[in-house]
Image (cartoon, rainbow, N blue to C red):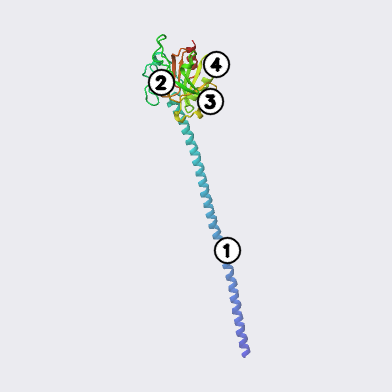
Amino acid sequence: MAEESNYTKNYAASADEQASQAKARQQKPGKRDAAKAKAKGRSAAQAKVKAASEGAGGASAAASKKGLVVGIVVLVVVIVVAAVAYNVLAPGAQPQSLQTQGETTQRVGDGTGESGPDGAAGSTDGAGGASGEDADAGKTAAPDFEMTAVDGGKVSLDDLKGKPVVLNFWASTCGPCKMEMPEFQAAYEQYGDQLQFVMLNVPDFNGETRERALQLVEQSGYTFPVYFDDTTQGQVLYGITSIPQTYFINADGTVEAYASGAIDASTLERGIEMVLA
């Protein structure tokens, strides 16, 4: 009877153990599913974060590209407006007409010329003593002054008497000056044996230097004679307050005509014909 009782107990314990194991087996798939679901949730969250990051990066790149395009457009507009304003407002930007005799007298030869760069009135006593109007011709005597040649030698305007002179005040930092220089080169090639060309550089105009001036001449292939108004005497005597300025001087040293501002080929031709007549 005791053996039967023990058997019964052992059987019951074994049955309980089997039931417990079966229950545990039933619970394990649920835990695995929960773990999988949790991992899947993490992956989805990571995917959302990545997508958001990529979207922000794309938006940032698009905004940067748009800003670059806008910047380029603004720069182009500024350049166009500056070019238009320069052509409209820059002194001497447009071809000018010749002024002759009586109008020239107001600038040189009578002591009432326009003030030079330092504010001094344009005295008309040149180094050679010529001043006022020529008694015989009734024309204004071109004030004499000393200038420096490219080789460093000193030359006075009176040294050039005997041939007509085309005297031009210019600088490489002057837009209108550069605009008219090809016309002067062409005229020099055509008339260089009949008259003197004096291309007088104005130092310190908008940062002008001898080196910059000569670089422009060399790079452009100009062969006309270049001089430098190192003492600014020429600018003072001729009342130069803006450039370019061009004077047409007769062989006897009297001023025939002048032009304030850039001149075109036809105006330059007329001035030359006047002093060669």
| Residue 262 visible in the picture | no
Q: Which mark is residue 36?
A: 1
Earlier along the polypeptide chain: callout 1 or callout 4? 1
Q: Which of the pair 241/203 is nearer the observer?
A: 203
Q: Residue at x 57, y 70 (%)?
A: 27
Residue 190 shows in the view: yes
Cα distance, mark 2 to mark 4?
A: 29 Å
First-in-chain label (3 vs 4) = 4
Which of pointers 3 and 1 indicates the residue nearer the eye? 3
Q: x, y (%) of residue 195? A: 51, 15
Toward the top, the furthest residue is: 136
Residue 99 placement (x, y as % from top left):
42, 16
Please give the residue where the numbered disc 3 appears in the rendered image: 217
Marks 1 and 2 in Cβ contact (< 8 Å): no
Q: Amino acid at mark 4?
A: Gln
Q: CA distance from mark 1 to mark 4?
A: 97 Å
**Residue shown at 54%/60% (left/top)?**
42
N-term mark: 2 or 3? 3
The amino acid on which the numbered mark 3 sits, given as a three-letter code, is Val
Circle 1 — which element?
A: helix
115 on left or right of 154: left
- Residue, disc 2: 237
Q: The N terminus appears in which quarter of the rendering?
A: bottom right
Depth order, front residue of 74/215: 215
